[in-house]
Amino acid sequence: MVDAITFAKSDEQTMLGSTVRDFLEATVDFDAVREMSTTEDAMDANVWNGLAEMGLIGLHIPEQYGGAGFGATEVGVVFQELGRKVAAVPLLSNVLASTAILSAGTDEQKSRFLPEIASGETVATLAVYEGAHDRAPMAGEASLMSRDGGWVLNGVKRYVTDAPNAGVFVVSASTPDGVALAVVPSDASGVLVAATNSLDATRPLGEVTFNEVSVNSDDVMADASGAIAAAMDMGVVCLAAEQVGGAQWCLETSVEYAKNRYQFGRAIGSFQAIKHLCADMLVAVEHSRSVAWHASATIEDAKESAIAVPLARSVCSDAYVKAAGDTIQILGGIGFTWEHEAHLYFKRAKSTSLLLGSVDSYRDRLADAVGI
Amino acid sequence: MTGSDQAALVAETIDKLLADNPPATTEPKTFWGAQFDAGLAWVDYEPGDGGLGVSPKYRELVSRRLNDADAPMWNRMANIIGIGMGAGVLAAHGTKEQRQRWLRPMFTVDEVWCQLFSEPGAGSDVAGLATRAVKDGDEWIINGQKVWTTLAHLSKWGMVVARTDPDQPKHKGLTYFIVDMESDGVDIRPLYQITGEAEFNEVFFEDARIPDSQRLDEVGEGWRVAMTTLMNERVAIGGNTVPRGSGTIGVAVETWKKSGSGEQSDRRELARLWGEVEAMRLTAMRATENMTAGVPGPEGSTGKLAWADLNKEVTSFTVSMMGLEGATIPEGYTLEPTVYGTRMTERVLSPQRLFLRARANSIEGGTSEIMRNILGERVLGLPGEPRVDKNVPWKEVPRG
Ligand SMILES: Cc1cc2nc3c(=O)[nH]c(=O)nc-3n(C[C@H](O)[C@H](O)[C@H](O)COP(=O)(O)OP(=O)(O)OC[C@H]3O[C@@H](n4cnc5c(N)ncnc54)[C@H](O)[C@@H]3O)c2cc1C
């Protein structure tokens, strides 16, 4: 377990990171992102198509189902870069949905659903939350009733990430035999998607109503509570890496500005009030990086990840929210403007800390795991 | 040697040490002597200096294995300044004779060490110190006052920085010596602190004499040696890869279980703090790993600052969790000099005492303000502040 921990990345992993970084540096256009931020269905098609060309959309999906077959460390590497540029792509949603399918689906279901998710042709997302305070989301009120050899789905799912852009929903619902997941195309009859204006417009949310939607029995995965939990944990790994990348951008931006902005005849970074905010940000970023890497490296180890996942969630969430806030402070008035990118990070930071369950709920999990 | 050869060598040497000196039946001092001779005191040092000449990353393996075997390890605590800092200074700046003279008895705690840097007029600005050393034949005569000298009352040797040339700018006129704390002209008086103990002392030098053979490095190079000491100190304080959940966060968890309120909000806060401490621990592990991989990164310098802030938070929260019981202190304040390394009393390990002791964490070994300056300037490359003491002869710098 932790004794044998290693943080060293292989050359391939480092390469992957720099390839993605170079690509995003060249592709993400913040003017366009700001523009997108006034819409309800932001999605950066240039980034998405580029990731698809690089074969990175199905990064953690096994090769037999059309993915790249990477482990969670590579997933972390990619998400860190996406976070560094607040990239507006639905990769988190894809990972959530496909992890659930990988975990609950039969071979036949995986072969049928995963290839088009892996290629980026279809955006898939996991629809599990119903209320604003759901903790470990399971079926909720949504139900699957059997009818004429198939199923009928009813329910309303909220705060569904990338709902406005999704082609497929993986929906949790209760059946007489427990929690199941249904795979439902967004154009199925009875599916109504309403975009929600989201705090972080680069990650659109939506409310999805399922009204008497017929679902083939082939498209239902039974006994899915473990799969939902696995998807959530994988989501936390992605978000933690993204939080590290975002916080790293905040640190770099703050330091750069503090070196070049002069007041009272001095660079503002020579004032301790500013320098010390930067130093604290450095500590927070390094701590986040440690726990995020640790969470991705141990995701397959059930005992250790019971600690590492909530640990990453707790540490990275606070760190990014504080870093993004302090960055605005260090930038002064310019940091408060729509023109500067800082607000994109600030919004991403806050909203990330609220997605996939509250940070407090993970602290409860952490307390359970370590025997507090 | 390849990595796996090194790992095998270290593992075999540990096996042999434990087989030849079963911890349960071996006197601690005998064990430490054998550990030193086996090269397991500081594995990365040269053979003969208590090492095996392997990568420092195996230090952690040694600690873990010895810890698992219940071997005595409290020499690190009893001689914290010697083993934690002095050894590193000797390894970097000592001659072969100096290393052979001092390292072994340091490790076996036959000779305790202290660090005489701070003075009443020079704390954060330690390079401004005023203690004078003047050459007299093959000896140096030393006069001045040091303060906050931890463990001076139990020490045989002291690492002292003194001014040998007051006409030079402050960083340039310093020289580093090892002084015999039992020699004439060295007067040690306990200084009582917030906890009622005296870990530290005032030390007065009045015509004390130091043989030139006890000078480390060249005359005028004292600042460079002092920096090595401080780097080692900060790693000793903040860079330790301790077992998960140990130390004050362990006390916090115990306190929650034994006398916590049971409130969910307390439990969450405790889990949050546990997570922050674990993040710091993982960062220290990452730093060790990167250090040995040859790419020291920023993660190596954050530990001291992070630890100071966190330890204050953790210990303060622990006392809060105790409710009214937190307003008491076991055994009260009995003014007495500290003796490390013996059995810790209930008071020493009580959350209340740990809470009080933690206030020093952001002062000792460089204040948190100074650590933030260092991170900001040396790691992040932010500009320094305007300086009024640069390139001015030391004797012309304002003091007070
Ligand atoms: C428990 C304990 C054990 C110690 N053990 C030893 C020991 O064994 N040997 C030894 O030599 N010393 C020891 N010290 C001394 C310690 O290193 C000094 O106390 C410390 O460096 C601060 O110096 P000072 O107390 O003179 O405070 P000052 O330097 O006067 O600082 C006072 C305040 O001013 C701030 N300040 C000073 N300069 C700056 C600046 N440039 N920018 C921003 N803020 C600044 C400080 O952060 C602090 O808040 C020990 C101290 C303690 C508390």
Image (cartoon, rainbow, N blue to C red):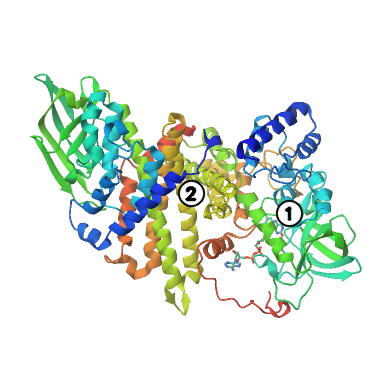
Judging depth in this view, the residue of B86 and B204 nearest the camera is B86
Residue B150 is marked as: 1
Establish if A226 lies above or below A267.
Answer: above
Residue for badge 2: A287
Rendered-image quarter of ligand 1: bottom right
Give x and y (percent) for residue A229. Answer: 33, 32
Q: How crowded is mark 1: few (under 14 residues within 10 Å), some or many (20 or more)?
A: many
Most extreme residue toward the front is B1
The residue shown at (16%, 33%) is A184
Q: How crowded is mark 2: few (under 14 residues within 10 Å), some or many (20 or more)?
A: many
Q: Please, what secondary structure does the residue beneath circle 1 have?
A: loop
Amino acid at dot 1: Thr
Give x and y (percent) for residue A92. Answer: 29, 43
Q: Is residue B85 visible?
A: yes
Establish if A344 lies above or below B349.
Answer: below
Q: Is mark 1 within 8 Å of ligand 1?
A: yes
Q: Can residue A317 be seen in this view?
A: no
**Labels 1 and 2 positioned on one and the same chain:** no
Most extreme residue toward the right is B137
- Is there CB contact under 8 Å for labels 1 and 2? no
Tell me where residue A169 sits by quadrant. Answer: top left
Give x and y (percent) for residue A254. Answer: 42, 64
Specify whether A331 is left or right of A110.
right
Q: Distance between the residues labelled 1 and 2?
A: 30 Å
Judging depth in this view, the residue of B202 and B285 nearest the camera is B285
The residue shown at (41%, 55%) is A248
Chain designation of label 2: A
- Numbered disc in front, either 1 or 2: 2
